[in-house]
Image: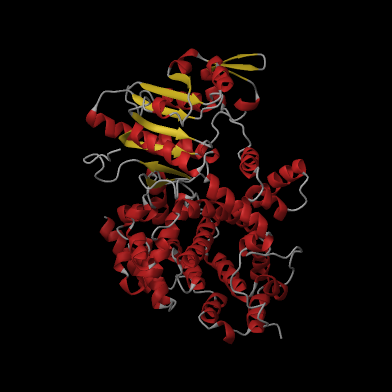
Amino acid sequence: MMATPSVLRATGSSANERSEPLIQIRDLIYKTAGIFQADNKLQLLERHCNKRMKALGVPTLRDYYGCLTVNPMHQAEMVSLLNEVTIGETFFFRNRPQLDAIRKIVLPIIIDAKSKTSQAPLRIWSAGCSTGEEPFTLSMMLLEETQGTLKGRSAEILATDLNERSIAHAKTGCYADHSTRHLEPHFRNKYFNISGDKLQVKPEVQANVSFSRLNLLDDSRMLFAKGMDLILCCNVLIYFDAASKRRVIEHFYRNLLPHGYLLLGHSESLFGISEDFRLVHMPSATAYVKSGKDAADSPRQP
Amino acid sequence: MSVATASHILEKLEFTRDLPTVPVVLMRLLRYMEKPLDQVDVAQIVNLISQDKSLAGHCLQVANSPLFGSSHEDEVVSIQASVMAVGVTRIQQIAVSCSLLRLMPTISFGLNPAVFWAHSLGCALVSREFATRIGYPDPAKAYVAGLLHDIGIVALLWVAPHDFRRCFEEASRHRIPLHEAEQRVLGITHCESGKIIAQNWHLSQELTDVIVGHHSPAIAPSSSVLTSIISVSDLLCRIGGLGYGYSEDKQTDFTEEPAFAILAAKYRALRPFDLARFTFETEGLLEEVRAVVSQVYGAH
């Protein structure tokens, strides 16, 4: 007869059965970095781990989990693994569902809120902008919406990064094929000058963006980025420890206007870091909103 | 106009013989699933599914996908083997899901049949996971409820396909929830048409409550917990890109959803709950659903 207890197994997930140490590593990454690898990404995670294991000469995932926890160099190893996980690269129109959510949902809400209070320009901060693809993507998107959602309102984008070389590259506005591979022809033709295999961002796209080197942990300089409507901070906080994350998030909170939005990278979460923001869901994207229903009336004191 | 349309459709639903009859296999599976596990006759279930070659074929495709935790290295090629591989509870869930395929019209009236099945299957899986996570005692029941919650759409497709198409077009054009467009265009929603079909099929009171109340969980007090689980899961699926084939342009704060409040009042696990993480898990799950559905429909 077939009805043995094992046959009647009612629960159990593919993930748990596949590899216990891999799940531990996934959960450790989420706990320390706040970025989550869903079950269908576990194979990819395993490949990233294998690459690190090869570099370290570590034979099994269980041993590698040890490298990420008890080994004296475990924090440095976590950074190396995170570099693999996030691929450490950026390109134009990288997170399309997020960009769609900004354009179709977030911007109209922000512009509506602003129209009641001020004529001030829309202010967006790309925190951790790397070589500039993200702020220039936003700039192009805003140019498309100048007469639409923005209703003629001007816009400013502050783009900051810790890495001086990245900022220097961003300021040139000059890109190769690789980071422009997801550019639609419409954007490529309208907003770039093409010479040979180089694409140069046109001046009108650069005009909205100001680049600056900034350490997000530099409390005194963080105080100056005030009056933001929207902050994007993708794949940056994952490298910070919990206390530093909290500090940065508190700054973001203070720097946002009452209706302001904070958007993180794909599968990044603030759970356990901050309860000040409201988590909201949009099609295939999540965001953190500063205001509760009555936040505009009673702003939170720092 | 819409009042006339509404009463016309309800009348058709009440009195017509055009309603889809419930597939025999589906009804028998639903009844088996209400039994405690130790009273389940595995051989009977294997026979029931195996007799229907097309159903068995679809079941094997789904059983061999990562969705149902098939930890086996080799592909299973018979229902009997798949029971060994994924367990009898899951084979029943798979079979109920696949028998739903039978109910869909073969042509699209706006809503693509594959998209509808993907939404139902996705909602079933998310409901089961969410139920497990919060500590609801019967995740298998949540699965079936998630699977059948939109059965009213099938009813509308049968008795008023062209009216339904207008609803679908209205919803996708304005990127609003389907039930809001139905209310606007027809004066009734798939919750009301679902109620009639649920009674027609003699579904349990709990399932009927879910079908009627998943867009307004507070009005189904007797089963409000199960209804709320399905309501939250349905919303997560629609947000996660597995809705009805278009995206609803709005932002959702789950803590403001009545369904979430009903559950938070009852389950400690939701105070607080890492909804961001659950959303990312759901996204992964839904990607797998998409892959399985295109496999099943590709082979149609």
Q: Quadrant of the N terminus of chain A?
A: bottom right
Q: Quadrant of the C terminus of chain A?
A: top left
**Residue B233, above or below B19:** above
**Residue A198, above or below B286:** above
Q: Which image quadrant is residue B195 in?
A: bottom left
Q: Position of residue A154 (x, y in %)?
A: 35, 21
The residue at the far front in this view is: A72
**Residue at left 32%, top 62%?**
B216
A112 with respect to A251 (left or right): left
**Residue A62, above or below A107:** below
**Residue at left 39%, top 35%?**
A252
Residue B160 in sight from this viewpoint: no
**Residue at left 58%, top 53%?**
A27
Coloring applied to the structure: secondary structure
Query: Considering depth in this image, is B30 or A26 the residue closer to the camera?
Result: A26
Q: Position of residue A21 (x, y in %)?
A: 67, 57
Q: How many marks?
A: 0
Q: Which image quadrant is residue A141 in?
A: top left
Q: Position of residue B247 (x, y in %)?
A: 45, 46
Q: Position of residue A286 (x, y in %)?
A: 44, 44
Query: Considering depth in this image, is A217 or B134 the residue closer to the camera?
Result: A217
Query: Considering depth in this image, is B222 or B171 the residue closer to the camera?
Result: B222
Residue A90 in sight from this viewpoint: yes
